[in-house]
Image (cartoon, rainbow, N blue to C red):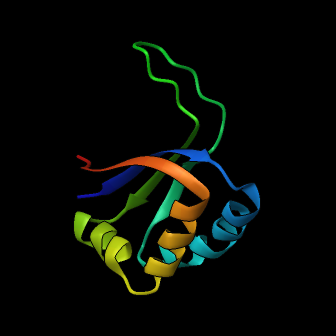
Amino acid sequence: MPAYLIADIKITDPATFDEYRKLVPPLIAAHGGRYLARGGASEVLEGAWKPNRTVVLEFPTMAALRAFWTSPEYQPLREMRERSSTSSMIAVEGI
């Protein structure tokens, strides 16, 4: 069953984050992931959520998502993302 990584990202260092955005897509693809949404326009329909940059990734399974998240190749990129932004993220299984 597919799994989704959903992130709300506030960019604090655009230059560093731009480098992260260039480096991470091949690694996501290597783990079977693909972008479904990547910073496009959003509209709050209910509640007080104030999204910044929304990213939605789809992976074939939760195991594939976790393999990406914990991979040694992603850790330096994760540190780059953390230095250049603040984020809220969840992983959720699909149907």
Residue 40: give x, y in percent of width and height: 65, 39
> What residue do we see at 59% from left, 28% from top?
42
Which residue occupies the extreme right position in the image? 15
Can residue 3 be seen in this snapshot?
yes
Quadrant including the N terminus: bottom left
Residue located 47% across and 14% down the image: 45
Please indicate whether residue 59 sits to the left or right of residue 18 in the image: left
In x, y percent, where is residue 60?
Answer: 33, 65
Picture coordinates of residue 16, whole percent (x, y)? 70, 65
Residue 17 versus residue 28: which sits nearer the camera?
Answer: 17
Residue 53, horizontal then vertical, whole percent: 59, 41
**Depth check: 76 or 91 in front?**
76
**Residue 30 seen anywhere in this rendered image of the structure:** no
Q: Residue at x 56, y 63 (%)?
A: 83
Decide if residue 20 is on the left or right side of residue 75. Answer: right
Q: Is residue 89 left or right of residue 27?
A: left
Q: Nearer the viewer, residue 60 or 48?
A: 48
